[in-house]
């Protein structure tokens, strides 16, 4: 059995789509479809059912998936052990990132890493549910490393701190509160809020703070990144209370007087699995780039 067939099976299981799996593997869609068919013939079972546009694992597929991942992990470990020094470092690292926020100079890190370790493939992935989705993908083995901004992480996940950002209030320059230096969440209780979607670390932190204060917010728009929250708030479409990532904007920034924990973004990895040298080396590069 060819390794690429197992890689295709695992990728389709993760993406729920042959098209997205093919894009992730840099392969033709027909190649991935043919690979799945070949694997199903080999095992004599159907691996996926189609539900609408989504491919869902069958019971047999669910049973075989962890073994396919284990085989691929073992091969990665064998390649890792065969590397005599850093010049021969090879393998694959799957890194979950935020596309809209510079936690570290990631492009610089990856450029340097590729120059030093050209035999290592780094795959960058995102999640529509923000840091919650990234940590879930990490815990399930779909990622090797991931940014995390969760206030607490699941057991078995370890996080190396990278950046800390305090919550501030973003609003339009003509807002009635714009001339104040600071406000409390109670001062904003009757405002319309713009925020990130559920699952983002900053949303979890602020929701918990509001719950402790007995404040029920009216959220009129949910964005998939924090810079969009700041941009829409600066345009006067609502109030944004998000971590200050230093994003340029045309509005006003106020201090928040409430004791809200800052967003602490770190690099997460599984503590119950020995990382390959490639994973460990990239993690060291990222941590070294923090400011």
Image (cartoon, rainbow, N blue to C red):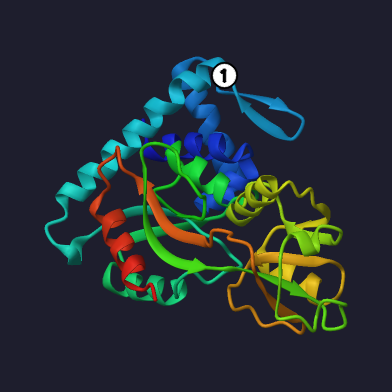
Considering depth in this image, is 62 or 141 the residue closer to the camera? 141
**Quadrant (top left, top right, bottom left, bottom right) of the N terminus:** top left
Residue at image coords 24%, 43% = 77
Pick the residue in front: 59 or 109. Answer: 109
Mark 1 crowd level (few <14, some 14–19, many ≥20, 10 Å Cα): some
What residue is shown with label 1? 46
Question: In the shown orientation, is residue 83 left or right of residue 110?
Answer: left
Percent position of residue 194, x then y: 78, 61
Q: Nearer the viewer, residue 262 or 2?
A: 262
Residue furthest out toward the left: 84
* Left or right position of 252 against 34: right
Question: What secondary structure is marked by label 1?
Answer: loop
Residue 135: percent from left, percent from top? 49, 45
Q: Who is closer to the viewer here, 166 or 98? A: 166
Q: Residue at x 32, y 60 (%)?
A: 283
Where residue 182 appears, x then y in whole percent? 70, 75
């Amino acid at each position: 059995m060819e390794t690429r067939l197992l890689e295709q099976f695992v990728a389709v299981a993760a993406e729920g789509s042959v098209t997205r799996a093919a894009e992730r593997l840099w392969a033709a869609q027909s190649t991935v479809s043919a690979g799945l068919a070949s694997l199903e013939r080999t095992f004599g079972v159907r691996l996926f059912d189609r539900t609408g546009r989504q491919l869902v694992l069958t019971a047999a597929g669910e049973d075989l998936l962890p073994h396919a991942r284990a085989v691929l992990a073992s091969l990665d470990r064998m390649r890792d052990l065969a590397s005599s020094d850093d010049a021969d470092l090879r393998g694959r690292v799957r890194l979950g990132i935020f596309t809209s926020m510079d936690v570290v100079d990631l492009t610089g890190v990856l450029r340097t890493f590729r120059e030093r370790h050209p035999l290592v493939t780094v795959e960058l992935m995102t999640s529509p549910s923000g840091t919650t989705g990234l940590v879930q993908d990490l815990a399930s083995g779909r990622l090797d490393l991931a940014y995390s901004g969760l206030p607490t992480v699941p057991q078995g996940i370890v996080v190396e701190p990278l950046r800390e950002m305090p919550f501030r209030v973003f609003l339009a320059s003509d807002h009635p509160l714009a001339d104040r230096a600071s406000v409390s969440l109670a001062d904003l209780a009757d405002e319309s809020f713009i925020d990130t979607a559920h699952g983002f670390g900053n949303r979890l932190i602020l929701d918990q703070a509001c719950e402790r204060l007995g404040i029920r917010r009216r959220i009129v728009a949910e964005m998939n990144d924090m810079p969009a929250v700041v941009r829409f708030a600066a345009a006067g479409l609502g109030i944004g209370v998000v971590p200050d990532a230093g994003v340029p904007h045309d509005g006003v920034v106020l201090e928040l007087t409430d004791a809200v924990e800052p967003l602490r973004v770190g690099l997460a990895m599984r503590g119950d699995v020995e990382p390959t040298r490639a994973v460990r080396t990239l993690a060291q590069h990222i941590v070294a780039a923090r400011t």
